[in-house]
Amino acid sequence: MSNHEASNGSGGDETAPAGGPSGRNRRPDDPIQRRGDPSESPWIARPAVDAVDGGVTLGEREENDGRDPRTRIAYCLTREGHERLLVSWLEERGYEPVRLGSAEMEAARFDLCIVDRRTLGEVADVLTERQRRSSVLLPTLLLTSEDTGEALAALPAELAAVVTDVVSTPLRTPILKRRLEGALRTRRLSRELAGSRERYRRLLEHTPAAVFLVRDGRIEYVNAAGERTLGVRDGDVQGERFVSFVDEADRDRVASIVESVAPGAAIEFVDASLRRNEYAIPAELAIARIDDEGGDTVQILAHDISRRQAREEQLKLYRRAMDAATVGISITNPSLPDNPLIYVNDEFERLTGYSRDELLGRNPRVLQTENTDPETVDRLREAIDAGEPVSVEIRNGRPDGTEWHNQLDITPIEGDDGEVEYFLGFQRDVSDRHEREQRLAVLDRVLRHDLRNRLNLVTGHAAEIGAGNGDPAEHAAAITRAADSLISLADAARRFRSAMRNADVAEQVRIDHLITEVVDAVEERQPDVHIDCDLRTAAVRSNGSLKLAIEELLSNAIEHAGADATIEVLLERAGDDVLVHVVDDGPGIPVGERNALEGTAETPTDHDSGMGLWLVRWAVEAIDGAVSYVPNEPRGSIVTLHVPIVEESDASAIE
C-alpha cells in the first residue's frame, strides 16, 4: 500500500468498536482490560461478546505467518497508558516493541514506526531523512480517532509523505494485525526489490561487457567496462549522445537501429566500431529496448571484439599455413564415436587421393589395405588408446588401387584438464625413400653375391697357377673374364645411377628411334650378332635410363642365348602405353633372377645374381613404366617394357 492510501475500508465503520469508546459491554476477563485502565485507552477496541471479526479474540495468539521473531516495532505515542496496551499486544505476537523519540530514531534499528497525530510532527523530519538515505521502505502507521481519509487529507504534504497507512481508533485486533503485517510485508518486498536492484547494479558494474542505458539517444548510465572501453571515467559521458562515440562509418546505421528497436523485440546484434580518442575499437553491440513505463530506455551491451578478431586472424593464418603445408596434416576427435577425422589439409588430400568430403567423419583406417602390416596397426592402436605420441611407417592405399608408404607421426593434444581432446597427425609419402632403401638392399646383396663369386673364381684360378696345375694361359683367361665381368657390373651400376639421378629432367623422345640407335650400337660392338626389329612410331619420356634398360636387356639376351640365337625387338601400342618386347630363343632367365621382372620384392634369403635386371626394372619405373616377363615358346624369354606414351601434340614437337 502506498504512502497516500488509506486503509479504512468503508470509512470508519470497519474500525468502529462493538461497544463504543465509553467502554460499555466490557468483559471482566478481557486481557487488555486486565493490563490497564480501560477508561484511559481509546486505542484498542474491546470484543463485544466472545469474538471480534471472525472469532479472533484479543487474548488468542494468532499464527506468526513466518515473520521474523526479531522484527522491531518503534512506537512514539502521546499517552503512556496507550503505549502499555500496545506493547503488551505486540509482545504477545512475537514482535520486539521499542519506544523511541526523534533523537533516538536517527540511528536506531527498527522495521516499522507507529505514531499518532501529535508525535508525527516531531519525528517526520527524522523519518523523511532515513527514507531518503535508504532504498528500502520504512513504513509508518498513523493512529487516529478521526476518519482515516479525512485524517490523511488534513495532513500537510510533508507529513502525509511519511505516512504508509492510517488506522482508526479504537482498534480491533484483526484490523491492527492486518495493517501491521501488510506494512511489514511491503517492507520485505521493498528490501527484496532493493536487493535485486543492488545485485543487478553489481552485475552491471562487474560484467566484462560495456553496458549503456540510453534514453532519448543520450547516455544515462555506463558501467565501469563501458568507461574503460571509451577511455573515460567518473561518469564523464552521462548526458552525451551515444552515437557520438560510434565510428562515423557506422553512426547512421547504429542510430537507426537504436531508434527503431521495439520493446520486447528480439535483440539486435550489430557489428560496429566505437571511438576511444582517435582509435576505433571493433565491437559487437546487443541492442534491446527495456520494457519500462515509458519504453524509452534502450540497453546497449558493447563487447570489445578486437582481441577476438586478432585471434580469428591468427587462426586464419594458422589455417592457411596448415592448408598450404607441404606435409599432410590431419586432426581427429577421440570424443566422437570411432575417433573420426575432423580436419585434413590440401596435401593430405593429394597424398591419399581422397577428397575432404570423402574423409571427414571417417576413421583414418580407411587408408589401410590388405598389405598393411598388422603389427604396425597394433602399435598405432595401443599408442592412441594410451593417449601417447607415436611414429610409424605404414603402408596405405589410394582409391585408384595404388599403394604408398606413409611416414606417420601422431601427437595427442591435451585440454586444460590433461585429458586428450584431439590427435594431430603428420603424413609424408616416403615411398621413394622406401624404394631407395630396397634398391640399396638389393644392390648390396647382388654386389656381394657377384663379387664373391667372381673373386672366388679369381682366387681359384690363381691357386691353380700357383700349384702348377693346368695351362696357365687358360687360368689367366678365366681371371681376365672375371675381372671384365666385375668392371662391366660396376660400369652398369654407375651409368644407371647417373641416369636415375636425372629422373626429374626427362625429355620426350621417339622410342622407335631410340631402339634403332641401341640395336645399331650393339651390332657394331658384336658383328656376329643380328637383331630383328619390328617398330611402330611412338613418343615417350626418357631421362637416359630407358636407353640403358633396352641395352641391358639386349646384352643379357646375347650373353645367355649366344651369338647364334634369334633376338627380336617388337614395338606395339596398347592403350596409353607402348610395349617394347625383347624376345630370344635362348635357355631363358633363371627362376631366381626373375624377381626383378615379376615385381617381387627383394628378400634377404635370395642370393641369386641378376643385378642388371633389377637396374632395368628401376630404370623403367623411374619414368612411371613397368616390366613383365613370360617364357617364350618353345624356348627362350620375352621381357616387355610398358612405357607411357606422351600426348600426340607433344610428340609432333620432337620430329
Image: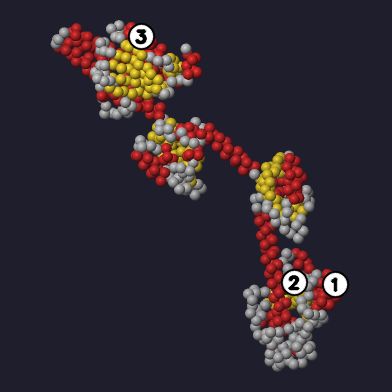
Image position of 594 (left or right of 369): left
Please name which of the two marks, 2 or 3, marks the residue nearer to the observer. 3
Q: Residue at x 78, y 75 (%)?
A: 6
C-alpha separation, residue under disc 3 versus residue under disc 1 = 134 Å
In this orientation, does residue 234 appear?
A: no
Q: Residue at x 46, y 20 (%)?
A: 646
Please name which of the two marks, 3 or 1, marks the residue nearer to the observer. 3
Residue 613, horizontal then vertical, whole percent: 32, 20
Report crowding for label 3: few under 14, some 14 to 19, many 20 or more residues within 10 A (C-alpha).
few
Report the residue marked by disc 3. 520
Image position of 505 (left or right of 610): right
2 or 3: tag closer to the N-terminus: 2
The reply to whether discs 3 and 1 touch (Cβ–Cβ < 8 Å) is no
Residue 371, horizontal then vertical, whole percent: 35, 35
Quadrant of res 123: bottom right
Q: Which mark is residue 1?
A: 2
441 versus 471 height, above or below: below
Question: Helix, strand or loop at disc 2?
Answer: loop
461 versus 418 height, above or below: above
Report the residue marked by disc 1. 156
Instruction: Tell which of 69 and 259 is nearer to you.
Output: 259
Q: Residue at x 54, y 34 (%)?
A: 321
Q: Residue at x 49, y 15 (%)?
A: 652
Question: Helix, strand or loop at disc 3?
Answer: helix
3 or 1: tag closer to the N-terminus: 1
217 versus 506 height, above or below: below
Residue 597, horizontal then vertical, whole percent: 32, 23
User: Which kind of residue does numbered mark 1 sit on?
Assistant: Pro
Please name which of the two marks, 2 or 1, marks the residue nearer to the observer. 2
User: Which kind of residue does numbered mark 2 sit on?
Assistant: Met
C-alpha separation, residue under disc 2 versus residue under disc 1 = 20 Å
In this orientation, does residue 532 appear?
A: yes
